Amino acid sequence: MKLRIALPLLFLVLCTGICAQNDAVIDVAVPVVEEAHDPNEPLTIAEVMPEYPGGKDALFAYIGTNLKYPQQAVEEGIEGVVFVSFVVEVDGKISGVSVLRGIGGGCNEEALRVVRSMPNWTPGMQAGKPVRVKYNLPIRYKLTGDKK
């Protein structure tokens, strides 16, 4: 009789121990496989993205101060967003400036001029090293009451 009670209790104790072990967290090291990357090809996303000196607020202030609304765009009532693409090089210089989508009326050319004249940026970083990073920047043109 004692054996009939002892065996189920022993089974219960063993099972509880096994179940508790299954709930444990097991650390497993998984090797990270890095994709082969051509160093001449700019990244679209880096661990640390490039940054304009002083950050986004300083970038917006620079654009606001230096961007001139083209007279043709004012006369034709052209408003909208010009999307400019460029590469921030490993030394922070801007290269490969182009219009991804424009609105005409001289706005595209003016956006290109302002981006080309920007000071050097802080370059993007990947694995602790500076890398080339492609950057897209929207530049908004909006007529205000005094320009209409």
Image (spheres, rainbow, N blue to C red):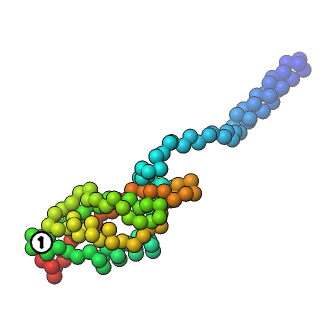
* Residue 58 vs residue 85, the one in the foreground: 85
Please determine whether, in this image, residue 82 is positioned above or below residue 75. above
**Is the residue marked by circle 1 packed among few (<14), some (14-19), or many (20+) residues within 10 Å?**
few
Picture coordinates of residue 84, whole percent (x, y): 29, 61
- Work out whether residue 42 can be spotted: yes
For label 1, the residue is: 72
> Against 19, is 51 above or below?
below
Rendered image quadrant of residue 142:
bottom left
Image check: 123 left or right of 14?
A: left
* Percent x, y of residue 92: 45, 65
Place of residue 38 in the rendered image (x, y in percent of width and height, measured from the top left): 46, 46
Give the number of callouts: 1
Which residue appears at 76% of the width and 28% of the height?
A: 15
Picture coordinates of residue 26, whole percent (x, y): 69, 39
Give the SS element for disc 1.
helix
Quick check: 128 above or below 146? Answer: above
